[in-house]
Image (spheres, rainbow, N blue to C red):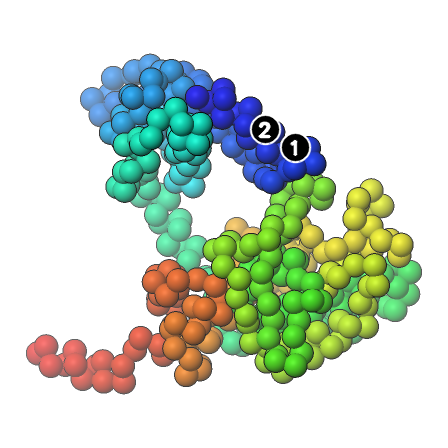
Amino acid sequence: LFDHYERYEAARASGERKVIEASTWETKKKGMNAMKKRFNWRDEQGVLCEVSPLTDYQIRELAPDAVKDWLHAFQHRQELLSRGKSPATTKYMNNLLSTVRQALKFGQLKRWWRVHPLLEYQGALIETTKAERNRQRNRSLNKPFSLVERDRIINWFHQQWSKCPAKKYNGKEKIRWFMLYHYVVIGFNTGLRSPSEMTALEWSDVDYTRKRLLVRKSREASGAVQDQIIRSYTKTVKHREVPMNDAVLASFRALEEFRQEDADWIFWNPRADIKNPLLNEKGWAPLTGEKRIRYAFDACLTALGIPSPENQGQYRMRHTFTTLALDHTDMSDDKVAAIIGDRVETMRTHYQGHCMNRWRSADDVEQLNNLN
């Protein structure tokens, strides 16, 4: 099954009909290679056991309990512990499980079987370790910026642009900061995902008359430039319209100055590498890749003394917009969730711990006094 599925995925990641990114395929391939290896694991009684590769299992042996046991052993394999490393992360383990399920769905498409218990199973098969739960909790404490921090960040980017010498790098450096400044303004005022949705924006997505921004595409932001394909859908698949306030409209009006005739992209990198396959006649390329924005954002947060663990700066623009919209507007939960392209339940799960006004009541204290 895995041999057939591996060839199928390799074909989808190459050629003229490429539909998945090369980086996605490389990640999946590494996972499949991991499932082909034998490893040692120390069970609950402390006995060192050798575990067979998951690819040695028969199709009928891929029952939920058996797969759960294999994933647990792989997550805590002796190879990691002997090197002083933590157990494998939940994200990595979920990627492995996803590959197994995708391979089984591939078998369904080939009509090798109709149903399989692992595809129908709804329970949890992956264990999140206590150390990882603590890391996730600590990381989430810094999700949204405060209103003051947001304004300081925007002002910092504005200063980099305004103070940059006009002739630096033949005038390209000032334009680069110009793009980044308006990128940050739009990110903080729309809640678009950065960089995937932001870097995929085109001028045809901007409706000045209705003051609406059409979010319908996303860009793969990792790997080589030629592999950063544009998807005709967003992370949650749905297209959506995002209202544009005066700050966003002003930024788009300003960006019109550098609108290119040969391409519809909004954000550009004037200092792109000469080997970039997307260069236009000016030597500019579309602003792509997670690092192009992250490096500037990290420099900003360091200069301002704002903590941001694990390079989460640009992603927190979306968190900040959502929290401020929930706390300082009269829009319903459904409306805010629709704007950011999330389900209401997902939004509440991620942001209810950060909102100071929403989901709070003025008489909370009095109600708690009634307990006594």
In the rendered structure, find residue 293 and report the number of the disc placed on it.
Answer: none
Identity of the residue drawn at 72% across and 42% down: 226
In the figure, residue 124 lies in which quadrant?
A: top left
Q: Quadrant of the C terminus?
A: bottom left
Percent x, y of residue 171? 88, 64
Q: Secondary structure at mark 1?
A: loop
Q: Is residue 170 above or below residue 120?
A: below
Residues at circles 1 and 2 in contact by the CB criterion of under 8 Å: yes
Q: Which residue is mark 2?
A: 10
Percent x, y of residue 101? 39, 33
In the rendered structure, find residue 14 and report the number of the disc placed on it.
Answer: 1
Percent x, y of residue 83? 44, 26
Identity of the residue drawn at 58% across and 60% down: 216
Using the image as rendered, state which of residue 304 and residue 10 is in the foreground: 10
Using the image as rendered, state which of residue 371 and residue 328 is in the foreground: 328
- Say whether residue 206 is left or right of residue 74: right
Q: Secondary structure at mark 2?
A: helix
Percent x, y of residue 241? 54, 70
Q: Quadrant of the N terminus?
A: top left
Q: CA distance from mark 1 to mark 2?
A: 7 Å
Q: Is residue 246 above or below residue 289?
A: below
Mark 1: give few (<14), some (14-19) or many (20+) Cα within 10 Å: some
Using the image as rendered, state which of residue 43 and residue 234 is in the foreground: 234
Amino acid bearing label 2? Ala
